[in-house]
Amino acid sequence: METGEVKQYTKYGVGEILLVTVGILIALQINNWNSSKILKQKEIIILQQIKNELQLTLDTEINPAKAYYQKQDTLLKRVVKFYKNPDLDSPPGYNFGHSEILTLEDSLPDIFNVLFEWHFVINTSAFENLKSVGMDQITNDSLRVKISTIYSNVYPQILLTSQRVIHFLEDQLRPLINDHYKLLQYRTQHDLDYFRSNHPFINRINWLHRDRSWVLKTLNESIPRIEILMKEIDQELKRLES
């Protein structure tokens, strides 16, 4: 073979290698682009699921529970004021200086109304799904940390404070009331006098008020954190979808 022909074949061979190499690189680039697009779509779906779950928890659990505990707080304040009245011989009906009067008919039902507690059911399926596929599916580091904080710290703190109240009611307050008289009997002045002079009962009512106030405080602190996180998820979704 002539020297010129060898050079020509060499050029063809190098050209073909270059073409194949460029083709492979383009294919890899397209594959990477497709993979990146798929991952982005997965991230969008996960963030939407997290946001929807956060909103559902606010609407069905945390905001209703806040309203419930605010009502319970008002009720407990009435009970605490009434049963801390030192004048045990005064007739039913006690004026607290702002036209609020509790009677026998008010006070004993109030005792039983404070025995009911909110039982939280917080759905975490979207977060569990995120953990199963990998937390790094959320590419925004700051957002990933905040999501984890809500589910791993904020929600457990709400459940912990609530469970503390539930256990206190079951172990301390209800047995004291149940042991005193039959619940189906008509409540009398004697029942009222018993509770107003029963220091263990009054102490437990004060403890209940304190623990319920702590639950309400936890909810009040948690709500804005969840709402801010939802806004940040919205912003991240707009960025990913643009």
Image: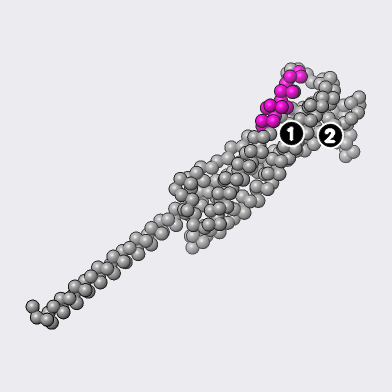
Q: Which residues are magenta?
A: 166-181
Estimate the x, y position of residue 193 in percent, counting from the top left. Answer: 85, 23
Residue wearing tag 2: 81
Image quarter of residue 143 = bottom right
Amino acid type, callout 1: Leu
Q: CA distance from mark 2 to mark 1?
A: 14 Å
Residue wearing tag 1: 208
Q: How is the image coloured?
A: one colour
Which numbered tag is attached to residue 21? none
27 versus 4 height, above or below:
above
42 versus 123 height, above or below:
below
Amino acid type, callout 2: Lys
In the shown orientation, is residue 148 left or right of residue 6?
Answer: right
In the shown orientation, is residue 222 left or right of residue 193?
Answer: left
> What residue is drawn where x is 51% and y is 51%?
48
162 versus 109 height, above or below:
below
Estimate the x, y position of residue 157 in percent, counting from the top left. Answer: 63, 42
Return the residue nearer the eye: 194 or 149. 149
> What residue is drawn where x is 57% and y is 45%?
152
> What residue is drawn where x is 71% and y is 23%?
175
Residue 36 inside the magenta-drawn segment? no
One can see residue 192 in this view: no
